[in-house]
Image (cartoon, rainbow, N blue to C red):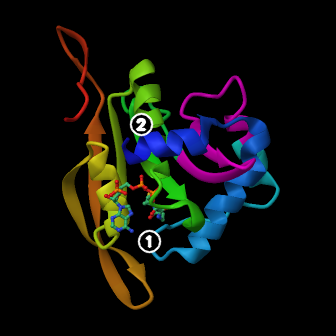
Amino acid sequence: MGAGDTADTRYVFRMAAAEDAAGIIELQERLGREEDFLLVTPLDPVTGALLLMASLGPSEPPGASRVIVAEGDGEIVGLVLCRDHQHPSLSGMVHLALCVDRDHRRRGVGTSLLRRVLEWARENGVRRLQLAVFAANHAALATYRKAGFEIEGTLRDAAVIGETAHDLHILARLVVRRHPGVSSQTIPEAP
Ligand SMILES: CC(C)(COP(=O)(O)OP(=O)(O)OC[C@H]1O[C@@H](n2cnc3c(N)ncnc32)[C@H](O)[C@@H]1OP(=O)(O)O)[C@@H](O)C(=O)NCCC(=O)NCCS
């Protein structure tokens, strides 16, 4: 049984709905304070929550955020935010942000969330999933690589924490290929 299978028996993974907005904001902003390598811009307490709720509603606008959550004992303990582009030419290049509560790490929750993202991406014709990760964030790099993401390049000295500039790696996983004259083709599972 792999880590993801273990997580599947202990946690519920589901697409977030508008009523999850408060739990999502709480987890993201708390981890943003706790973690050096998770950059979270706190939302405006009124408009931020409303905007997130609207984007999680049943008729999301183009380019809206989708969030998949991991729930344990009725609490949101992990989430992955998927943000598409509004411009039609860039739509289908989806940016990810992933986080798991400290008490629930190394149990396969991150891996299971990324598996759900991949399923959702395939069903929705997403071309590529991508994100930037601090080069020093070994836990995140290992989690994404295990899910078939590859480093495409490095943004040198891109982010500053305290006095120190850090490199960011751009990671991506291709999902559905679309090229002129070729019908769309789903990229197979990584071995
Ligand atoms: C990155 C993060 C989401 C991983 O979540 P998780 O639920 O612990 O991940 P998993 O249990 O699925 O681990 C997947 C694999 O990554 C590797 N890994 C995860 N955390 C690790 C760590 N601290 N040290 C070494 N390897 C680690 C392991 O290979 C692990 O597989 P294994 O347990 O079968 O060996 C979590 O550490 C986190 O929330 N970090 C803070 C937020 C962040 O940095 N997000 C990424 C930027 S978007």
Q: Amino acid at mark 1?
A: Phe
Q: Position of residue 94 (x, y in %)?
A: 42, 38
Q: Is residue 55 left or right of residue 63?
A: right
Q: Give how far across and how far down residue 181 sits, in percent.
A: 17, 8
Q: Is label 1 in a helix, a strand or a loop? A: loop
Q: Which residues are magenta?
A: 53-80
**Circle 2 is placed at which residue position?**
115
Residue at position x 24%, y 25% in the image: 187
Q: Are marks 2 and 1 in contact (CB under 8 Å)?
A: no
- Give the SS element for disc 2: helix
Farthest residue toward the bottom? 163
The picture quadrant for ligand 1 comes to bottom left
- Which residue, as the protein is rendered here, is positioned at the far right? 46
Query: Badge 2 local density, few (<14 within 10 Å), some, or many (20+)?
Result: some
- Assess whether residue 122 is covered by the magenta stretch: no
Relative side of 16 to 97, left or right: right
**Which residue is tagged 1?**
37
Sequence-first disc among 2 and 1: 1
User: Can you say whether 164 is above or below 38 in the image?
Assistant: below
Whether residue 108 is visible here, answered yes or no, is: yes
Which residue is situated farthest in the front direction here?
Answer: 1
Q: Residue 4 sits in which quadrant?
A: top left
